[in-house]
Image (cartoon, helix red, strand yellow):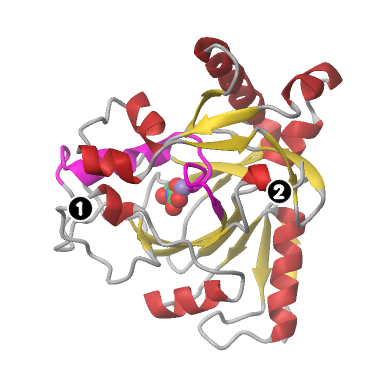
Amino acid sequence: MSITVTPTHPEFVAELSGVDLAQPLEPGDRSAIEDAINRYAVVVFHDQKLTDDRQIAFARHFGPIHSSAQRARHRSLKHRLASDEIADISNLDGDNKVMDQNARRRLDWLANRLWHTDASFRAVPGALSMLYAHVVPDEGGDTEFADMRAAYDALPEAKKKEVDGLVAEHSIWHSRGQLDVTRYSPEELASLPPVPQRVVRIHPGSHRKTLYIASHASHIIGMPVPDGRLLLLDLIEHSTRPPFVHAHRWRQGDLVIWDNRCTMHRARPFDTTKVRDLRRVTTRDVASTLEQAA
Ligand code: OGA
Ligand code: MN
């Protein structure tokens, strides 16, 4: 059976049906999914039944897997999931219990509520993220996506000229600092030093220009920090106006894939005394954005 692609939004986001991702992936289906990601940036599959191992095996068809930085950041904690290849995006602790309001990992996880793009704070950042829903709350907890190619296209020409060629410094500690989550050990801080990334890059799958910014981006290299920070805030505000944003309402069994190279995303609030169990596998980009065409 072949894959059907149904666009959800005028510019980006599509639903894909006609494939069972728990089965070995056929080459034709793999390329149909890749083409849809390149065109739509966010693709949604409903009613899937994936184990962690199967989710990892599926992701491997699309590139090498970025091992999660969660363990590096929370060295002393008991972790719920067995593999570094899968990130725990739930509000559950190592014993499968809803985390206390002040639990360290919960406070760190709350930074997903800021607009961001996965692993932009690593020298070789994330490419595709694949988030699978095991348990979702009845209300709230949507994930919102912003279309950064359309946002770039809509900038005035003078602004495009101003931002083309700029390089931002990205750091995970900058995004956490915005929420006053700062209690990390010197070893944890040292494990993820800041990295430079281009502000405008060419999206390899579509050859379109795209903004590459968000909450890990702290400032612009070579510009006074407040000027760079204000420029980044303006670009985020511009990119998250309604025409560029889509909200995904989760159902159990959804797998959503997004391309971090040309989107931002954020989690929306929900009653965090209820269980929300999502797990993510992310593929690695080929190199730092500075080593890629711009
Ligand atoms: C992620 C993420 C958002 C959410 O998995 O990278 O940011 O809604 N998730 O849980
Ligand atoms: Mn994320």
Image coordinates for residue 93, horizontal then vertical, percent: 19, 56
For label 2, being within 8 Å of ligand 2 is answered: no
> How far apart in space, not on screen, are marks 1 and 2 (Cα)?
33 Å
Q: Residue at x 37, y 57 (%)?
A: 136
Q: Residue under circle 2?
A: 292
Residue 211 appears in which quarter of the rendering?
Answer: top right
Residue 283 drawn in magenta: no
Total marks placed: 2
Task: Residue 75: give its label.
Answer: 1
Is residue 166 toward the left or the right of residue 173 in the image?
right
Q: Earlier in the sequence, mark 1 or mark 2?
A: 1
Image coordinates for residue 117, horizontal then vertical, percent: 53, 43
Q: Choose mark 1 or mark 2, whichever is in front.
A: 2
Instruction: Check disc 1: other Cα within 10 Å, few if <14, some if 14-19, many if 20+.
Output: few
Q: Residue at x 39, y 39 (%)?
A: 193
- Three-letter code for the amino acid on which mark 2 is drawn: Gln
Q: Nearer the viewer, residue 139 or 101?
A: 101
Q: Secondary structure at mark 1?
A: loop
Q: Which residues are magenta?
A: 100-126
Q: In which quadrant of the rendered image does the C terminus lie?
A: top right
